[in-house]
């Protein structure tokens, strides 16, 4: 019998970044890429958590570009939980303050991970289990979190509906991004739903058939 997980999506900040909460039947919850900019956006997430009687246990960052970490500290402090990401994202966090100045966005410093995540690590919180894929290209330590129970993958900014993550930022690599998608993301079953860091949901099968960008000759331009 399928576990009655709840997956909630919120869109925050000037970059329209998608923040996700996945919760099991007991209310244990994982928050992926908290992107809230200020107290008003914090309240949207916190009110949902309280209304649903959820108990956040962990923050997971697919990667640590500015728009995906703006709410890390607010969540960590409110619920006394840790954030985890790949070790290659630590320099990205270090650059976040400078990035915020470039885009003219107030920066709330992120908490740092107490433990980093390695590829193929299994993360279990209550009834929730994630397999970790290392999918660099958009960011040097980019991860995707696969929940086989729900047949979903949280792809961050690797794969979007009809598009892919940008590759013109420090640490990006177009060839690595295409390889990550072709060898890791597209290895998942076609019916797996992709929850992306921006934009609507899609499926692995739809992107295999229709995504123009994922081809060997793509330059990223």
Image (tube, rainbow, N blue to C red):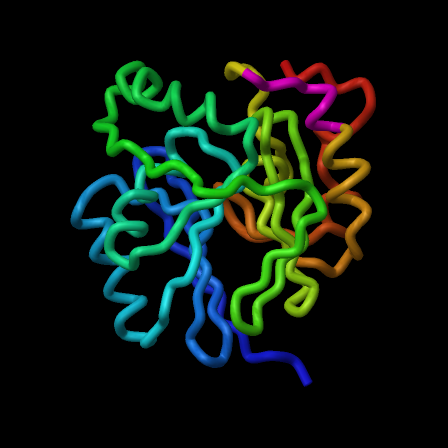
Residue placed most toward the observer, 1 or 117: 117
The residue under the point 73% across, 33% down is 180
Which quadrant, please, contains the N terminus?
A: bottom right
Q: Could you tell me residue 42's position as x and y percent? A: 23, 51
Asked if the magenta segment contains residue 173, the reply would be yes
Q: Is residue 213 above or below residue 76?
A: above
The image quarter containing residue 112 is top left
Asked if the magenta segment contains residue 184, the reply would be no
Decide if residue 8 is on the left or right side of residue 41: right
Q: Is residue 202 above or below residue 151?
A: above
Q: Could you tell me residue 9's position as x and y percent? A: 43, 57
The residue under the point 57% across, 67% down is 128
Which quadrant, please, contains the C terminus?
A: top right
Q: Is residue 32 above or below residue 156?
A: below
Q: Residue furthest left?
A: 39
Q: Residue furthest bottom?
A: 1
Q: Residue furthest front?
A: 114
Residue placed most toward the observer, 129 or 42: 129
The image quarter containing residue 182 is top right
The residue under the point 36% across, 72% down is 54
Q: Could you tell me residue 167's position as x and y percent? A: 59, 20
Decide if residue 196 is on the left or right side of residue 203: left
Q: Main secondary structure of the magenta part?
A: helix
The residue under the point 48% across, 48% down is 60
Decide if residue 69 is on the left or right side of residue 32: left
Write the start and end of the magenta stretch as one range.
171-178
Counting the numbered discs, the total is 0
Q: Could you tell me residue 181's position as x and y percent? A: 73, 36
């Amino acid at each position: 019998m399928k576990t009655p997980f709840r997956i909630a999506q919120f869109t925050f900040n000037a970059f329209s970044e998608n923040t996700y909460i996945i919760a099991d039947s007991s209310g244990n919850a994982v928050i992926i890429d908290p992107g809230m900019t200020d107290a008003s956006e914090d309240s949207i997430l916190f009110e949902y958590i309280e209304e649903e009687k959820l108990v956040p246990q962990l923050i997971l960052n697919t990667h640590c570009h500015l728009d995906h970490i703006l709410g890390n500290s607010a969540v960590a402090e409110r619920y006394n939980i840790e954030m985890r990401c790949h070790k290659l994202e630590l320099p990205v966090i270090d650059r976040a303050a400078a990035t915020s100045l470039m885009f003219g966005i107030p920066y709330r410093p992120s908490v740092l991970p107490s433990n980093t995540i390695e590829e193929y690590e299994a993360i279990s919180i209550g009834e929730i289990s994630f397999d970790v894929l290392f999918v660099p290209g958009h960011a040097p330590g980019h991860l995707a979190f696969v929940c086989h129970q729900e047949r979903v993958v949280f792809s961050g900014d690797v794969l979007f509906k009809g598009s892919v993550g940008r590759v013109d930022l420090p640490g990006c690599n177009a060839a690595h991004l295409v390889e990550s998608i072709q060898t890791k993301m597209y290895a998942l079953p076609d019916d797996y739903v992709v929850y992306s860091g921006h934009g609507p949901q899609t499926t692995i099968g739809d992107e295999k058939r229709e995504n123009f960008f994922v081809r060997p000759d793509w330059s990223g331009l």
